[in-house]
């Protein structure tokens, strides 16, 4: 009995201290210490996107990956060391993917207000900027994240896979405190960007012992994707844009799901399950609603796993 009470007390104490370790983010965090922070970041993102139209999608995806692994702590930006293989070099190989944009913004920020703006906040702000820049909504980004000191390639395995069904997707989001509505709204990030064949080609040939093509896919669309991803495939860069208006942030992604033209099985499954189908339909007919919910969910995503005992890195690729 005493032992049981003791265990309860310890658990309670742990919960309380965990609650305190979670720092509250704030829209005005840099108002005094670095008022020009957001302008410096916007300039870096805008300049890079002008030179390379792939930048916006890559930055948005970076934010998702960062927050889903160890919380939004810029672990995604740390470089591997001889002792440690970092997330960057983990299985969904995202090396060489526009990390330089965040590094460049950081270098400018260090000149303007040294040792003040965390790399995790730069990713969050840059993600908002790429959405707005692509025709999507604007919102105030909450700030005050600290950068973590750990990044492990093995942990990228905990990211949801493009082969997941709705049950698996819901579970993956729930583990980060995100709900079904967040899952559907944030999947709208696939209104931007591109996928390599490897992420969806299992849907195109020998899908199952009975069916050649994933039955949830439109047949003409499957034909088109097959021609983009021939077998054998000599082009490692071959693939498909995730939505037919891939550089515009709009609700076209949801419209495509309603006609079987989602690129990933995970995307298409959102239209095949009663828990998510109605949300997909509501976003497909109402872009304003999608924008509103996307903003809500991005703010929630930006709150995942905020750490207080982190640091403000001087360079985003290495711990201080
Ligand atoms: C719901 C679970 C998700 C799965 C299974 C998933 C999976 C993937 C995969 C497999 C790719 C293509 C990688 C490649 O072959 O190059 C991709 C790309 C992308 N994802 Fe997701 N993703 C998910 C959620 C998200 C979220 C929440 C966001 C942001 C809000 C996001 C933003 C992006 C973007 C912008 C791209 C394009 C990247 C580029 O063009 O380089 N994804 N995703
Ligand atoms: C703009 O981007 C280009 C290409 O990434 C880079 O070479 C240049 O230094 C950038 N200029 C500024 C002012 O950031
Ligand atoms: C991942 O990307 C890096 C850099 O482009 C490359 O050297 C490495 O071979 C890639 N690994 C895999 C498994 O594709
Ligand atoms: C989703 O996938 C899991 C794991 O493969 C499987 O156990 C489950 O039955 C699937 N659920 C649905 C609704 O398809
Ligand atoms: C489909 O699978 C069968 C048996 O595994 C194999 O013999 C055949 O070559 C495959 N077809 C394609 C198009 O990959």
Image (cartoon, helix red, strand yellow):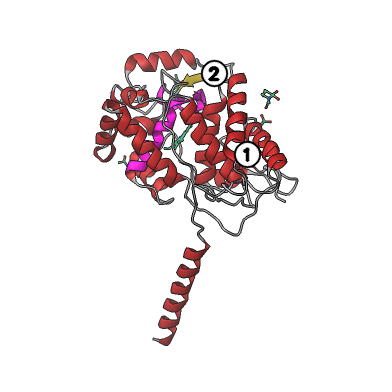
Indicate yes or no whether the magenta region holds residue 287.
Answer: no
| Residue 88 circle label | 1
At 44% from the left edge and 78% from the top edge, which residue is drawn?
9
| Secondary structure found at label 2 | loop
Q: Which residue is mark 2?
A: 238
**197 or 140, which lies in front?**
140
**Nearer the viewer's eye, disc 1 or disc 2?**
1
Indicate yes or no whether the magenta region holds residue 198.
Answer: yes
Is residue 270 rendered to the left or right of residue 177?
A: left
Q: Is residue 75 above or below residue 269?
A: below
Magenta residues? 181-204
- Residue 2 image position (x, y, % from top left): 42, 87
- Residue 143 image position (x, y, % from top left): 53, 47
Is residue 80 rendered to the left or right of residue 127?
A: right
Label 1 crowd bin: few (<14), some (14–19), many (20+), radius 10 Å: many
State which quadrant residue 11 falls in: bottom left
What number of labels is visible? 2
- Residue 58 image position (x, y, % from top left): 55, 30
* Picture quadrant of ligand 4: top left
Q: Is residue 99 above or below residue 80?
A: above
- Residue 117 image position (x, y, % from top left): 62, 46
Q: Is residue 24 above or below residue 318?
A: below
| Secondary structure found at label 1 | helix
Q: Is residue 79 visible?
A: no
């Amino acid at each position: 009995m005493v032992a049981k009470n003791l265990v309860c007390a310890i658990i309670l104490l742990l919960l309380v201290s965990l609650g305190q370790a979670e720092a509250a983010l704030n829209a005005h965090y840099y108002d005094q210490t670095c008022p020009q922070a957001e302008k410096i970041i916007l300039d870096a993102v805008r300049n890079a996107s002008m030179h390379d139209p792939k930048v916006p999608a890559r930055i948005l995806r970076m934010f998702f990956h960062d927050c889903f692994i160890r919380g939004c702590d810029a672990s995604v930006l740390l470089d591997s060391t001889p002792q440690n293989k970092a997330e960057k070099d983990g299985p969904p190989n995202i090396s060489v993917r526009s990390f330089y944009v965040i590094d460049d913004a950081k270098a400018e920020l260090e000149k303007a207000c040294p040792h003040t703006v965390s790399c995790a906040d730069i990713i969050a702000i840059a993600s908002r900027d790429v959405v707005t820049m692509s025709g999507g909504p604007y919102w105030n980004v909450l700030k005050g994240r600290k950068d973590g000191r750990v990044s492990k390639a093995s942990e990228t395995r905990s990211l949801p896979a493009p082969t997941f069904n709705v049950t698996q997707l819901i579970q993956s989001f729930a583990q980060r405190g995100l709900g079904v509505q967040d899952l559907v709204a944030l999947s709208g990030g696939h209104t931007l960007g591109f996928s390599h064949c490897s992420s969806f080609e299992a849907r195109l040939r020998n899908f199952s012992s009975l069916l050649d093509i994933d039955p949830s896919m439109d047949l003409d669309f499957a034909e088109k994707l097959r021609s983009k991803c021939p077998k054998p495939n000599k082009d490692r860069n071959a693939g498909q844009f995730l939505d037919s208006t891939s550089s515009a942030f709009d609700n076209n992604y949801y419209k495509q799901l309603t006609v079987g033209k989602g690129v990933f099985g995970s995307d298409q499954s959102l239209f095949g399950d009663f828990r998510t189908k109605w949300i997909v339909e509501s976003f497909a007919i109402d872009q304003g609603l999608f924008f509103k919910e996307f903003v809500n969910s991005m703010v929630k995503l930006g709150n995942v796993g905020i750490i207080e005992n982190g640091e403000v890195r001087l360079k985003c690729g290495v711990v201080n």
